[in-house]
Amino acid sequence: TSNAMWGGRFAEGPSAVMREINASLPFDKRMWQQDIAGSKAHVAMLGRQGIVAEADAAAIAAGLDGVAAGYAADGVPDDLALEDIHMLTEARLAEAIGPAAGRLHTARSRNDQVATDFRLWVRDAIDQTLAALDAFRSALLSRADEHADAVMPGFTHLQSAQPVTLGHHLMAYVEMASRDVSRFRDARARMNLCPLGSAALAGTGFPIDRHATAAALGFDGPTRNSLDAVSDRDFAIDYLAAAAQCALHLSRLAEEFVLWASQPFGFVALSDQWSTGSSIMPQKRNPDAAELVRGHAGRITGCLVSLMVTMKGLPLAYSKDMQDDKPPVFECHDLLGLSIAAMTGMVESATFRTDRMRALAESGFATATDLADWLVREAGLPFREAHHVTGRAVARAEALGVGLDRLPLADLQAIHPAITEAVYDVLSVDASVASRTSFGGTAPANVRAAIAAARATLEAK
Ligand code: ARG
């Protein structure tokens, strides 16, 4: 039999494969709440405008509440013949209230309906992500505060470079997460216009009030061009791009946790709750959650690419390709939600081995730059010469098997006579980090100020 909603011109129904390829219900049912909300706003407006009799509008609104209650109680069935959540809801409404249900779709198309539902869904997804990122930033801030002056090796090329503090290192991720927050907020602000009333593509001749439906759904106003409104998926791409960038940041932190939890580093012990064992090697404590956060960043990036490629060749206005917009967005939201929650949990519960960090910071000649800077400042050497002298000091210390701060003064003076006892003041890792007082530098006082500032913005928002 032909389709109940659009089958008027058809003698035969679709083939089974046609039905299956066409159906979005198995995934778009995730938008049922947004679909009900959109329909209720629409029918209330139709009633107020006298486009539908007030009695019918009231019956439809009550019927939609009943359909929603049914979905909430029993879930949304995968009735493929009904294609999508929009037609399923309308069919359920008809079962509940009879022919008046047929008036709901006046002055509306599934094209503006789905564009509206999807914007509402992405807006909710952004709000959930923002809340999760606040919890993530709070976790980083408390651990950074705890370790504001814990010295660790800072790396470039993954080679010991200069000492930094663990607090400073963790605060770098607060900066990244804060930019992610601003990208999500930006995407949310830009997308918050309502497509409803654009109808199929050209608008409608019915005297609708688009400002009213936009306001009822929490939008800042209606979209300005009906063709654009039904074919725009930028809002979803903006969301995916922000999500991909956020996932990429989480992935870098996850990678550091994997590295730090390895025996050669030994910088961190993940809590039992965030570790997994091996079925063969009893000693194992694997950082699987961190590895999966790193893995998920790849899939999330794939979601962004998927929708961009879907959209790139589509002429205006709606094409059915656009139905493929939802799976990558839903997948992204699930993966990102898990990733943020997992990193938050790992950060909150990890034990940082600050003794080990300090030992490695002291062993890598990480204060060599401090020695060179001292030679410039106190002995008046040009930096290039100071660099060379320091290189010889490092070689000597390496030969003796000691750190720079344990290299005897006689050895230092043999390399350059201007070196005095006072040089030892700058050769400890604590002196090194304490000296980095330039704005944004790793000195513990700076790190504490950065934490206070970040807390203030987090609380102010
Ligand atoms: N299920 C469709 C989607 O997600 C709804 C819009 C269908 N519109 C249409 N003209 N066939 O894109």
Image (tube, rainbow, N blue to C red):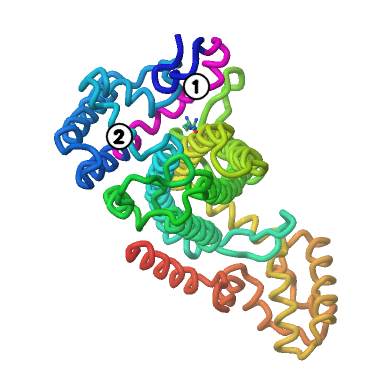
Expressed as whole percent of the image width and height from the top left, the position of residue 381 reads 80, 87
Q: Would you identify the image quadrant in which residue 380 lies?
A: bottom right
Is residue 128 in view from this perspective? no
Name the residue: 55% across, 77% down: 439
Helix, strand or loop for the magenta stretch, by majority:
helix
| Residue 426 sits in quarter | bottom right
- Residue 36's disc is 2
Q: State whether residue 303 appears in this view.
A: yes
Identified at 61% across, 72% down, the residue is 432
Which sits earlier in the primary sequence, circle 2 or circle 1? 1
Q: Which residues are magenta?
A: 14-37
Q: Is residue 147 left or right of residue 215?
A: right
Asked whether mark 1 and ligand 1 are closer than 8 Å, the reply comes as: no
| Rendering coords of residue 131 (x, y %) | 37, 50
> Which residue is labeled 1 in the image?
23
Name the amino acid type tagged 1: Ala
Relative to 316, does residue 376 appear above or below in the rendering? below
Q: Nearer the viewer, residue 436 or 294?
A: 294
Q: Nearer the viewer, residue 208 or 424?
A: 208
In the picture as drawn, the residue positioned furthest to the bottom comes out as 380
Q: Looking at the image, which residue is at 57% across and 49% down?
A: 241
In the rendered image, the vertical position of residue 277 relative to residue 55, given as above or below: above
